[in-house]
Amino acid sequence: MTTIAIKTSSAEREELVRSHLPLVGHLVREMLGRLPAHVLREDLISAGMAALAGAARSFDPARGIPFGSFATTRIRGALLDELRGLDWASRSVRTRARRVETTQQELTAALGRSPSQQELAEALGVAVEELKSLNEDVQRSVVLSLQGFTAGTAEDLVPERAAGPEELILHRERIGYLHQAVAALPERLRKVVTAYFFDERPMSDIAEQLGVTESRVSQLRAEALVLMRDGLNNHLDPDLVAAARDKGCVARRREAYYANIAAQGDLSARLAVTNPLGMPRSF
């Protein structure tokens, strides 16, 4: 009996990990949009996958917490830990650097010019030598990249700010529109977008499934993204819709696509895609 229970538990954990793999990609993409270019996606994916597996091992359904919410917290924490590992400066150095920067800005505003090292040191209550030593510590910690870290810590790079009710509703509506825009795509384009972005399948697999070359898959993906961009802007911000040069049947198909997005459902249908916290319900 015990052996059967262990096997069942192991199978359930494997299913949790398998079904929530897209969650790792979603959280990494969300974080990468606010990070320097030298932070590698592969490093974050690896940390997120390890956290997902760990979450599955420690998950207790009896607590009544959905696994998606439980895993999201673990994965985000792992991603922040990974970023802290990339930040070469200690927390104390970063804290002192922020204090120097704040004081320098205040003096610049008060004096109408950049303060000298002596003025800055006096305002901070330290010796000029100590100020120079701090600047050297910060310089040594800088990652050698033109787009390296700022003076903040990993938490500063990925700020966690709670959205207000109105902002959250708008965020959920945009996600709903995105799902409707994907659903409204022509079948071939929809398959490419779903396989590449949602299932995160290699382009070679998609090409084999559709019976085309990888180059053709890339073209279909680009076509779908342009169509979706204009379709979303048509509903969310018409001023951003690119001036259409299409004529005849091409223009009619584009207009039909816009109408198909609207036909997917109303505001309630769009909000139904996410839970009240803005997380996809599938997670």
Image (spheres, rainbow, N blue to C red):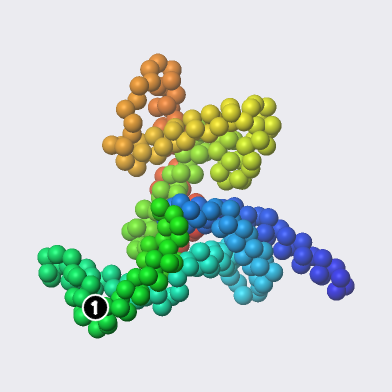
Location of residue 206 in the rendering, given as x and y in whole percent from the top left corner: 64, 35
Would you place residue 185 above or below residue 115 in this image? above
Disc 1 target residue: 121
Would you place residue 38 above or below residue 93 in this image? above
Front residue (pair 128, 254): 128
Quadrant, the N terminus = bottom right
Front residue (pair 246, 35): 35
Q: For the view shown, which residue lies furthest in the bottom direction?
A: 125
**Three-letter code for the amino acid on which mark 1 is drawn:** Ala
Residue 271 in view here: no
Q: In the drawing, does residue 133 fall left or right of residue 175?
A: left
Q: In the drawing, does residue 223 fall left or right of residue 113?
A: right
The number of callouts visible is: 1
Q: Who's the residue at 53% across and 67% down the image?
A: 85
Location of residue 56 in the rendering, given as x and y in whole percent from the top left corner: 67, 66
Front residue (pair 145, 29): 145
Location of residue 130 in the rendering, given as x and y in whole percent from the top left corner: 32, 79
Q: In the drawing, does residue 133 fall left or right of residue 228?
A: left
Location of residue 231 in the rendering, given as x and y in whole percent from the top left corner: 40, 35
Q: Who's the residue at 34% across and 58% down the image?
A: 167
Q: For the view shown, which residue lies furthest in the top direction?
A: 248
Would you place residue 275 above or below residue 60 in this image? above
Tag 1's secondary structure?
A: helix
Would you place residue 216 above or below residue 177 in this image? above
Q: Who's the residue at 82% across and 70% down the image?
A: 5
Q: For the view shown, which residue lies furthest in the front direction?
A: 129
Quadrant, the C terminus = bottom right
Residue 178 in view here: yes
Q: Who's the residue at 45% across and 48% down the image?
A: 176
- The quadrant holding residue 177 is top left
